[in-house]
Image (spheres, rainbow, N blue to C red):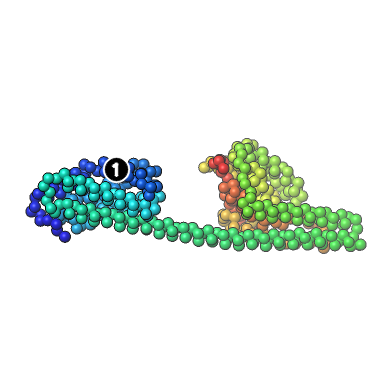
Amino acid sequence: MTTTKPGNPQALEQMANLAAHLKEWRPAMLDSLRVAAENDRQLSQSSRLSRAAFYDHLPEVLDALDRKLYAWPDADEKRDQGEREAGGQHGRHRWQQGYNLREMMHEWGLFNARLVEELDHFALQQAELSPPVMPAAHLIAARLFGEGISESVTQYQHLLQTEAAGRVADMEQALQQMQSDETERGQSLRIASHDLRGSLALVQGAASMLQEPRLDDEGRRDMARLVQSGVATLNQMLTDLLNLARLEAGQEKREIVAFDVAPLLQSFCESSQPMAKERDLYLRAQGPDSLSVEGDPIKVQRILQNLLLNALKYSQHGGVTVSWQECENDQWSFCVRDTGPGLSEGAMPLSKELMEATDEATEAPDTTAPDENKKSASPAGGEGIGLSIVRRLCALLEATLQVESNAGEGSIFRVILPRRYESD
């Protein structure tokens, strides 16, 4: 639509004067708009924004209006790319700033009302105003705001859909994780049942042998020791199950304190020496004499305990080395290296493969007759539970658990922990 002929110099001059007036009036208009928004109960977010954040892309929208007014009548029907981009960016920023769609539309209404008021104010100040000027100016402004609102809403809706899609993806991922955890929990309980059954079979077998009248005194003492060992094992496994249940229920809380971890690890290794000697294995501790960290010393010791017991169980010769060191990125780590049968090649996180390996290695002991040539009975089963406890404790301490293992060459369990924690 053409509102006037290019040959009407008076109308062109008056439209240019209107554009210049609006540009001069812009700072006052934006300030007035901000005050109106802050006092409007429907715009709860605007009062929290800085001046620059509130103005956002509104100046660019007014720039587009200036260009249309100066180009009139030739450009009043053309879509201004800057106008579209400003409207879209404004919608994106209002979404990021926490506006809902209704608030954003209401703000556009206030913006439009301020502009219409100023257009009418300009018209009242002009003694002789060419008839086509103000209708054309109102039409240009209406189209401008219509385009700006359309682009803002389009961008806002696109971001809402993107956010919704992201939430769906997060929910699907969380569901998959829950299913994986349930499968893993079932695997742990299956292994625990297997271990409990094996230990109970040992106790039952030894108790039956005690009733054998042909058994000599030395044999009775051996069977009594097996009963005592089996009962202790059952007690430990039940304790582990309770500990795992507490971890899974979120009842375990970390207690972060500053402490020297080196003496703690060294002392635990020394107290575990009798267990290693019973199996004719060495147990070495290597690391600096002092390593100051923050963390939960009790839970660090529990992680080491589970890994060390597991390593001693599977090492039939050689032994176990526990080492600790300071790491980059304000971290520290400790390792449990054994000379057991090992797992598959390569480095991996703790996974179902470890659970399967412990399941295959757990067998009910034979109580039919003692064999003096065998080594002392290995630590009891239950490592499936132990590894689950290790994983849960590592998660609680924001630690990473890694495994390096090659079949026939032993395994290295490495725990990497933060050296500092933010306040809980």
Residue in the image at 67% along x and 62% along y: 190
Q: Is residue 117 left or right of residue 167?
A: left
Q: Is residue 351 left or right of residue 156?
A: right
Question: Can residue 424 be seen in the rendering of this structure?
Answer: yes
Locate the C terminus by quadrant. top right
- The answer to which of 163 and 195 lies nearer the viewer is 163
| Residue nearest the observer in this picture, 283 or 393 | 393
> Callout 1: helix, strand or loop?
helix
Number of residue marks: 1
| Mark 1: amino acid | Ser
Q: Residue furthest left?
A: 7
Quadrant assignment for the N terminus:
bottom left
Q: Image quarter for residue 35?
A: top left
**Residue 69, image x and y in percent?**
18, 50
Q: Quadrant of residue 260?
A: top right
Write down the residue under mark 1. 32
Q: Position of residue 388 (x, y in %)?
A: 64, 55
Name the residue nearer the viewer: 143 or 319: 143
Q: Residues within 10 Å of mark 1 (few under 14, many from 20)?
A: few
Q: Nearer the viewer, residue 241 or 215?
A: 241
Residue 60 in sight here: no
Residue at (57%, 62%) from the top-left corner? 179
- Residue 294 x %, y %: 59, 40
In the displayed structure image, the side of residue 63 where residue 155 appears, left or right? right
Going 74% across and 62% down the picture, which residue do you hit? 197
Q: Is residue 73 above or below residue 274?
A: below
In percent of the image, x 70 and y 44: which residue is there?
A: 269
Residue 39: x %, y % from top left: 35, 44
